[in-house]
Image: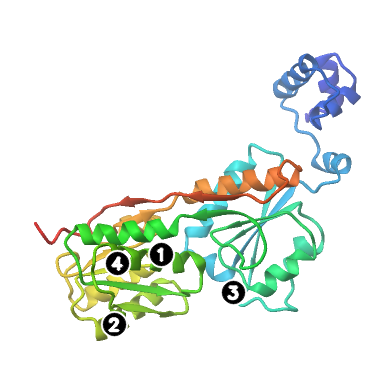
Amino acid sequence: MRKTIKDVAEKARVSTATVSLVIHGHKRISEQTRRKVQKAIKELEYYPSRSARDLVSRKSGNIGFILTEDHFLRTEPFYTQIFLGTEFESRKQPYYVILATIPKDFKEGDELPRFILEHSVDGLIIAGKVSQPFTKQIKRYQLPVVYVDFYPDSGEHSAVLIDNLNGGLEATRHLIDCGHSEIGFIGGDISHPSLRDRFQGYKMALEQSKIPYKAQYIYTSESATSREGGYRAAAKLLENAKNITSLFACNDAMAIGAIQYLKEKNYKIPNQISVIGFDDIEQDLFIEPTLTTMCVPKVDMGSEAMRLISEMVNGKMKTPRKMMVSVSLVQRKSTCNLNK
């Protein structure tokens, strides 16, 4: 039989009003009484009614998680791992996480996710690049927002960001340290701040090593950073850059697509062309050769975003906070040292 607040009160030998105050974190309750009630709650395995708590707090207890449709795919698991991190963290806090997707090209007049229109969330976590019309529309609802792996051009925002610049620098340095000087770069949607910074890191590494920048070694015209985009980008790049001995793909999905193309054209990886990606997704371990990449702590980013939005919803954060997470090199079999 499901236990009630009355059962908790009887076991803790307090009033039902006192139990309610403990559940809602009221400061009037002494620490001794709080511990006694919490012990009774745990022993009885009592779970307070969510609707009753909502009536008292005037909050929904929900956090909305939004990403574009093209990022919620089995072949694009980066943002789903971030979502998983928010879910893990929400278990430690009194929140549910509700997922919604929007079109990549969201335009003014397009319908917002229903949980925003119905005022069913207390705050939003927005993962990945979204359009300006979307960020403009959600401002009208005055909800706390945390961005992940994206930062809008205007205004100050709370965000969890990747150190893409240094990641791109380290990825390219790895290839240089392996003896490569003819280094190609492929990407898509280069207007995305993360991808733009990775490309900037690539150029910085060349400059620091006094390696000439060659425009024909760059292809960034793909609209999607997908496996298919990586396949097409590698094909286009090698039409004009047959001398490259290594390739830096702006993310792992494109790197995997590029490897598929190279293998079909009988390039030996890594002996003829080394390949490095960025993100460290699970599929990297199931291709041949396994992919050298930059590891992004995706689940941790989601957890951090959840902690930030919780602070904002509860009024503990007065000014926007920006957090930067570091990345690290994971060397596998798709790169090799030319000097050996």
Real-space Cα separation, disc 4 to disc 3, in angstroms = 34 Å
Comes first in the chain, label 2 or label 4:
4
Residue 289 visible? The answer is no
Residue drawn 70% across and 49% down? 319
Residue 209 is tagged as: none
Q: Identify the secondary structure beneath mark 3.
A: loop
The x and y percentages for residue 122 are 76, 51
| 8 to 88, vertically: above or below | above
Do the residues bearing badges 1 and 3 touch, measured as CB atoms within 8 Å? Answer: no
The x and y percentages for residue 301 are 53, 49
The residue under label 1 is which amino acid type?
Answer: Arg
Q: Nearer the viewer, residue 191 or 113?
A: 191
The x and y percentages for residue 72 are 54, 64
Real-space Cα separation, disc 2 to disc 4, in angstroms = 16 Å
The answer to whether residue 158 is left or right of residue 234 is right
Task: Check disc 1 and report the residue beneath it.
Answer: 198
The residue under label 2 is which amino acid type?
Answer: Gln
Comes first in the chain, label 4 or label 3:
3
Q: Residues within 10 Å of mark 3 (few under 14, many from 20)?
A: some
Residue 193 visible? The answer is yes
- Residue 282 lies in quadrant: bottom left
Between disc 1 and disc 3, the foreground one is 1
Do the residues bearing badges 2 and 3 touch, measured as CB atoms within 8 Å? Answer: no
| 336 to 50, vertically: above or below | below
The x and y percentages for residue 26 are 83, 29
The residue under label 3 is which amino acid type?
Answer: Lys
The residue under label 4 is which amino acid type?
Answer: Glu
Residue lying furthest bottom? 239
Q: Residues within 10 Å of mark 1 (few under 14, many from 20)?
A: many
Viewport quadrant of the N terminus: top right
